[in-house]
Amino acid sequence: MKHKINVLFLAVSVGLICLFFFETPYFIHLLVTVGLLFFIIMSFGVLFMKFNYFLHSVNRIKNDFVLLTFDDGPDPEKTQIVLEILAKHNIKAVFFMVGNRAEQHPELVKRVVAEGHIIGNHSYAHNNFMSLFSKKKLKADIEKSQTVLEGLSGRKIPFFRPPIGYTNPTYAKVLKEMNLTNIGWTLRSYDSVYKEPNKLIERLMSKIALGNIVLLHDNLQVTVDSLDHFIAQASANGIKFANGDTIKTIQHA
């Protein structure tokens, strides 16, 4: 809806400029200004899901707990450690899995489900340029991952998160057709940037709040090294994480 309004604004603005300023010195400057404004708004829409510009994304939860989410797995070593840490603290999470990695490690997909976690679709090949795909190619990738994940888990996969977090009108159309809910985040850990566990923990602890959806990656060593200490510190500060009972409410996000 926001994108449609922006396009309508562009069309009306260009029409008015042509009508009233066509033969004036301001004509080109006004067109460039309006075009630049449109481009900036579009860019924010692509780069930041939280603005819900192209499609509605669930970027936080209304409940009084924190939801941990993990992207880019499953990883044959690190995902297992993450699962052990979550089990130690009785925490349930959402794992946004890459289809071709799930195919390579089907036992981990089954373990994630067996231990009470939710699986989400994170594309089949995690191509960093997916936002440039045609609708046909984009849908084929997401459908392929959906088939793999549902086949291995034995569960319906209701959620999707795009690689890198970019969205656009094509994503909006495909996800609507596939009846998938796009899940964003409230707190981005930047565990792909931080290399030292103490720095990552410091960032998370400075931002964490009830209702947050936290973005982490279960294929990164720094996440594995930080997770147990982060959960312990956050819990000591009164933060509650999703458990076996509360994770069920996520299905109705």
Image (cartoon, rainbow, N blue to C red):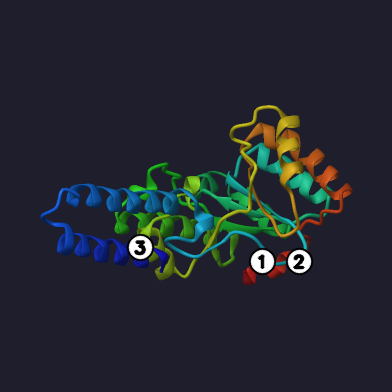
> In the picture, residue 19 is in which quadrant?
bottom left
- Residue 203: numbered disc: none
- Residue 6: numbered disc: 3
> In the picture, residue 210 is in which quadrant?
bottom right
The residue drawn where x is 76% and y is 30% is 198
Relative to residue 103, is residue 77 depicted above or below?
Answer: above
Q: Which amino acid does label 1 sit on?
A: Ile
- In contact (CB < 8 Å): disc 2 and disc 1: yes
- Residue 250: numbered disc: 1
Q: Can residue 37 be seen in this view?
A: yes
The residue drawn where x is 74% and y is 56% is 66
Q: Where is residue 112 in the image (x, y as percent from the top left)?
A: 67, 54
Estimate how packed mark 2 is, as few (under 14), some (14 to 19) or many (20 or more) residues with alpha carbons within 10 Å: some
Q: Is residue 139 visible?
A: no
What residue is shown with label 2?
A: 246
Label 1: which secondary element: helix
- In contact (CB < 8 Å): disc 3 and disc 1: no
Estimate how packed mark 1 is, as few (under 14), some (14 to 19) or many (20 or more) residues with alpha carbons within 10 Å: some
- What is the quadrant of the N terminus in the image? bottom left
Which of 87 and 107 lies nearest the eye of the viewer?
Answer: 87
Q: What residue type is labelled 2?
A: Thr
Hey, which residue is sitting farthest right in the picture? 236
Q: What residue type is labelled 3?
A: Asn
Estimate how packed mark 3 is, as few (under 14), some (14 to 19) or many (20 or more) residues with alpha carbons within 10 Å: some
Q: Is residue 36 left or right of residue 158?
A: left
- Mark 3 or 2: the one toward you: 3
